[in-house]
Each structure stands twice: as structure tokens, then as C-alpha cells.
Amino acid sequence: MNPNKKKIKVLQYGFGPIGQETVRAVLKKEGLELIGVVDISPKLVGKDVGEILGEKRLGISVKQSLAEALNGQKADIALHTTTSFVKSVKPQLEELIRAGINVVSSTEELLIPHLQSPGEAKEIDELAKAYNVTILGTGVNPGFVMDTLPLFLSSTCLDVKKIEARREVDAGTRRLPLQKKVGAGLDVDDFKKLAKEKKLGHIGLIESIALIAEGLGWKLDDIQESVEPVVADKNYKTKYLEVQKGQAAGLKHVAKGFKNKEELIHLDLRMYVGAKEPYDYIHIIGTPEIKCKFEGGIAGDQATVASLINSIPRVLKASPGLVTMYKLPVPYALINANVL
């Protein structure tokens, strides 16, 4: 450890379940220093961060505004964990950019922001370049398992004809917001109605399709997706809710990327309460053919937190503007920020 090395000053923006776990991790990392936390929840504002985490007082309380949280200090990076959509987080990102703060965000659409919000993405990119800061959207999925990881594995292929990825996740082990997002405990008719209205489902699967395609230089003609319920075969009880036999235990969400009516990318995500053998599986049809299976799957919430924190050094060294995972160096674990 270099005693003269300045610590990386970290601001946490959004203090829900993922934000809280991110702060726990920041506090344990050598070379990182938490300087403030922003959240608008009346249940959190004004309370000591340590006490909210069930630990000793830190002397840092949750603030409702960025200015209050900074209190005259300068943050090097913000770990941003609020909502899923570019249009919703744009004002938050602009505020952080104008404060001269680099951002790593878990906002799913930010993985490939120009896919669904090209105008907003252009404005964010231009503002970030003007203020010389970098903005990255990442996470475990989207951000790694079904997009960045297949691209990384393709580095050993001479050619790639098709990429398939499948992920089976036991939603019963995950946080309540995710269980609700996948429709666990809903009657099947209610599930289908909400899915049709796009009020439930996984956010980011079509962004994963786009990331793979852009990384490989494929110009897709069409991206299609479908969401169906996985029906419970018996009664289940999680820490947060109950699922009766015949109700939706979760979802099967499929996204496909096409060029000239040929399917080049197929992503199959199944997140439901009661999944007996979770796993992640990637199949690259090419030369050579690659099949890779992760027994038990990659732990979602922990991996999301890790993805955010481990992206810090890459973002701090990146060119300003909106960046994407495939344009940055290969990710790796940040064990000690003092060595950067």
C-alpha cells in the first residue's frame, strides 16, 4: 500500500437494496472512500448510513440533494443505482456530470442508451464530454453474463455465426423488487395483462442483444422479444411473498436478433421462484464452437455490486462521454484501489 496514494472518493447515488450493498462493499475496499449518499426516500433521509446498514455510525447521513451530500467535497466517481430507464435518470446524470463526477450506473437501458433513447443519449454524451467525465451503464445482466461475457469468449473464435445464451435464476433467493418485477405470485391472467402493458419483465435484454451485435459489427434488421409466465408446479414461500400452485412463479423472457431474417442472437432468460438448478449457459456457433456453462449461475445481486465497483478504474481511465462495456478494457476484480 502506498501511504501517499490518495483514495478514490466515492458518492453513492440511490440507496435502495443494491445501493446499500454497494456501500457495504465500498467500505471494505482499500483505496476507496465513501464521502456521501443521496436518496429521496423519507425513510432514509437524515439517517446515518452505518445505522441503516446495521453497523456502527459512519458520521455520514443520507441527503436528499447532491449538493448536501457533497458538502463542498469533490467526488471522483458516483455509483448510481436508481431506476432502469434512460429518460428517467437523465436529470440525475446531468446533475452529476455538471458536478464533474464520473458515473458507473446500474440503469439497464444505459448499457446501450442510444437503442431506445437516442436523443437523450446524445445529449448526455455531449454534456459528459463538455465536462470531461465518463458515464458507463453496467451490471451482471445486462452488463456481463448475456452480453459482455459472450463477446469476451468470442475472442478465441475465427468466425462467429450465432450466439446463444440462456440464464436460469431462482428468483426466490433474490430481493423483493426483483421478485415483483418477474411477476412472482400473480395470477396468470394478471401476469399476461401486465406483460402486454410492459409493466413487468426484465429490463435490458434487448440492450444485451444490441451490445453483442455492435461488438461483433453485426447490423441487425430486427430485434424481437417475448415474455411468458413460468407457472408454479406447487406452492412456494420466499422471504417476501407466497406463490400458489398455478400462479406465475416468474417469467421466461426471450430476445432474438435478426439480419436478413436469419437469427444471429438468441437470449433466453428464465427467472422464477423454485428454479431447482440455476445456471448460466453460453453457446457460440463458430470456429471453434464454444459451449460454456456456469453451474449454479453467477450470483445476481452480489455480481451486480461487483460489476459496479470493479468498473471504477476502467471508467476513471476512459475517454469522456457515454461509453459501453465492449469499448473498455477487459474487466477484472478491483481488490485494492491503492495499486491503481
Image (cartoon, rainbow, N blue to C red):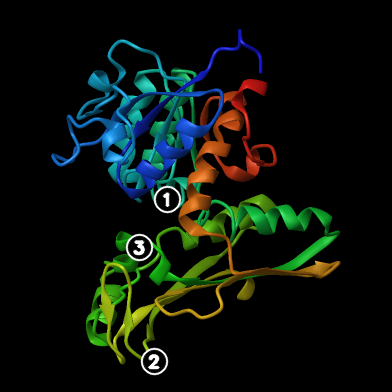
* Location of residue 199 with respect to 307 vertically, above or below: below
> Answer yes or no: do the residues labelled 2 and 3 have beta carbons within 8 Å?
no
Q: CA distance from mark 2 to mark 3?
A: 20 Å
- In the picture, the disc for residue 109 is 1
Q: Residue 120, percent across and down? A: 36, 39
Type of amino acid at the residue the image marks with label 1: Glu
* Location of residue 111 with respect to 55 vertically, above or below: below
* Location of residue 123 with respect to 21 vertically, above or below: above
* N-term mark: 3 or 1: 1
Q: Which residue lies under the disc numbered 3? A: 178
Type of amino acid at the residue the image marks with label 3: Leu
Q: CA distance from mark 1 to mark 2?
A: 33 Å
Closer to the camera: disc 1 or disc 2?
A: 2
> Image point 62% across, 21% down: which residue?
338
> Image point 29% across, 75% down: which residue?
196
Type of amino acid at the residue the image marks with label 2: Asp
> Image point 30% across, 60% down: which residue?
177
Circle 3: element type: helix
Q: CA distance from mark 3 to mark 1?
A: 16 Å
Q: Residue 56, percent across and down? A: 33, 31
Mark 1 Cα within 10 Å, few/some/many (few <14, many 20+)? many
Circle 2: element type: loop
* N-term mark: 2 or 3: 3
Mark 2 Cα within 10 Å, few/some/many (few <14, many 20+)? some
> Answer yes or no: do the residues labelled 3 and 1 have beta carbons within 8 Å?
no
> Answer yes or no: do the residues labelled 1 and 2 have beta carbons within 8 Å?
no
- In the picture, the disc for residue 233 is 2
Residue 298 falls in which quadrant of the image? bottom right
Mark 3 Cα within 10 Å, few/some/many (few <14, many 20+)? many
Q: Residue 13, percent across and down? A: 33, 34
Circle 1: element type: helix
Which image quadrant: the C terminus? top right
